[in-house]
């Protein structure tokens, strides 16, 4: 009978976690929360560093936004600002692409429109200068060939 009661005591004590195990579990939870908070702080610092970098690098900004979203910082003001900036940078890239396409097609009306859109969005003029210079060089070659052939 004593073996049955000893087994019952052992069974009841094994169903309850020991104070040491409970302490370890609490410590692990605390470590996870601290690590999570530490990761969030690092993510915020990285996001801010990319936000205030001049000129803005859209690839890095997109990566920082994705990291911040994955870290659960959805309502962070820096993340909201970064999303807005990323959207603006995408609009600028699309406008520059339109300038490039218009220059390649030699479509002056589309080129004027795309250039005006770039200026309105605040695209750095040096980005536009490259495509416009290329277009002018090609037109100069065409004009020279036409002149050489008496056209």
Image: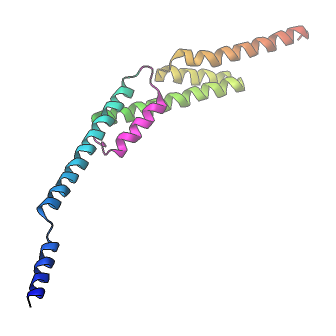
Q: Locate the C terminus and report the quarter of the image it occupies.
A: top right
- Residue 37 position, x and y percent, is 25, 42
- Residue 97 position, x and y percent, is 59, 29
Indicate yes or no whether the magenta region holds residue 35: no
Q: Quadrant of residue 56?
A: top left
The outermost residue toward the front is 2
The residue at 70%/25% (across/down) is 104
Q: Nearer the viewer, residue 6 or 81?
A: 6
The residue at 64%/19% (across/down) is 131
Would residue 46 appear left or right of 149 to someone viewing this image?
left
- Image vertical order of residue 10 relative to residue 74, above or below: below
Instruction: Report the magenta residues as a range.
Output: 54-75
Q: Quadrant of residue 15?
A: bottom left
The residue at 54%/21% (across/down) is 116
Q: Quadrant of residue 17?
A: bottom left
The residue at 64%/16% (across/down) is 132
- Residue 83 position, x and y percent, is 38, 36
The outermost residue toward the right is 149
Q: Nearer the viewer, residue 127 or 122?
A: 127
Q: Locate the N terminus and report the quarter of the image it occupies.
A: bottom left
Would residue 102 appear left or right of 13 to someone viewing this image?
right
Q: Is residue 75 visible?
A: yes
Indicate yes or no whether the magenta region holds residue 57: yes
Q: Nearer the viewer, residue 130 or 63?
A: 63
């Amino acid at each position: 009978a004593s073996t049955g009661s000893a087994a019952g005591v052992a069974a009841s004590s094994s169903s309850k976690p020991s104070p040491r195990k409970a302490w370890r579990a609490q410590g692990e939870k605390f470590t996870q929360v601290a690590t999570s908070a530490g990761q969030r702080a690092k993510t915020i610092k990285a996001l801010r560093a990319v936000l205030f970098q001049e000129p803005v690098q859209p690839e890095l900004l997109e990566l920082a936004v994705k990291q911040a979203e994955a870290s659960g910082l959805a309502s962070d003001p820096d993340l909201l600002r970064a999303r807005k900036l990323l959207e603006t940078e995408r609009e600028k890239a699309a406008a520059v692409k339109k300038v490039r396409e218009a220059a390649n097609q030699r479509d002056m009306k589309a080129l004027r429109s795309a250039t005006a859109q770039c200026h309105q969005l605040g695209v750095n003029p040096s980005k536009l200068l490259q495509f416009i210079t290329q277009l002018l060089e090609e037109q100069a070659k065409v004009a020279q060939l036409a002149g050489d052939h008496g056209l």
